[in-house]
Image (cartoon, helix red, strand yellow):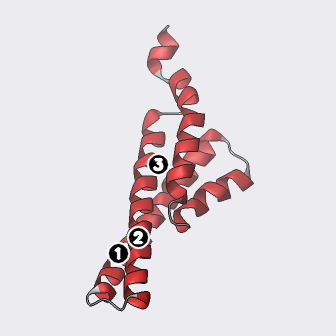
Amino acid sequence: MKKSVLTRYRVMAYVTGVLLVLLTIGVIAKYLLDMDGAADFTRVVGIAHGWLYVLYLIFAFDLGSKAKWPVGKQLWVLLAGTVPTAAFFVERRISHELEAKVAEDSPAAAKA
């Protein structure tokens, strides 16, 4: 597996996670605190999160298929972008798990 597959998953996991946390804060500001401007903020962040979550799903699915994960693990990673802060924890666990696999599949390791 190429390092770029893991890298693009990691980037999208962080982007999706940050946007979901911002969306959660916006929803709290809009409905619980009744703040001015929170509706516009929530709308913009919600749209951005929705579109970028689709990219996250594509990259996470690609990573899972190349890593040959079972369906349950694949679903766990795909759904991590829907729970605030879960994407950060899942990304960290997956990265630690796959870094060794990426290192052994790299061209430098093949030459040694």
Question: What label does residue 87 carry, if any?
Answer: none
Residue 28: percent from the left, percent from the top? 43, 82
- Is residue 62 something one can see in this rendering? no
Question: What label does residue 49 carry, if any?
Answer: 2
Residue 15: percent from the left, percent from the top? 39, 58
Q: CA distance from mark 2 to mark 3?
A: 15 Å
User: Amino acid under label 2?
Assistant: His
Where, quadrant-wise, is the N terminus in this rendering?
A: top right
> Given the current orientation, which residue lies at the most extreme top position?
112
| Neighbourhood count class around disc 1 (C-alpha, 10 Å): few under 14, some 14–19, many 20 upward | some
Q: Relative to 45, does residue 92 appear above or below in the rendering? A: above
For label 3, the residue is: 9
User: Amino acid under label 3?
Assistant: Tyr
Count of marks overlaid on the render: 3
On the rendered structure, is 27 left or right of 105?
left
- Is residue 63 something one can see in this rendering? yes
Q: Relative to 30, does residue 82 appear above or below in the rendering? A: above
Q: CA distance from mark 2 to mark 1?
A: 6 Å
Q: Relative to 79, does residue 7 appear above or below in the rendering? A: above
At 40% from the left and 49% from the top, the residue drawn is: 11
At 55% from the left and 66% from the top, the residue drawn is: 83
Residue 23: percent from the left, percent from the top? 40, 74
> Given the current orientation, which residue lies at the most extreme front position?
33
Disc 3 secondary structure class: helix
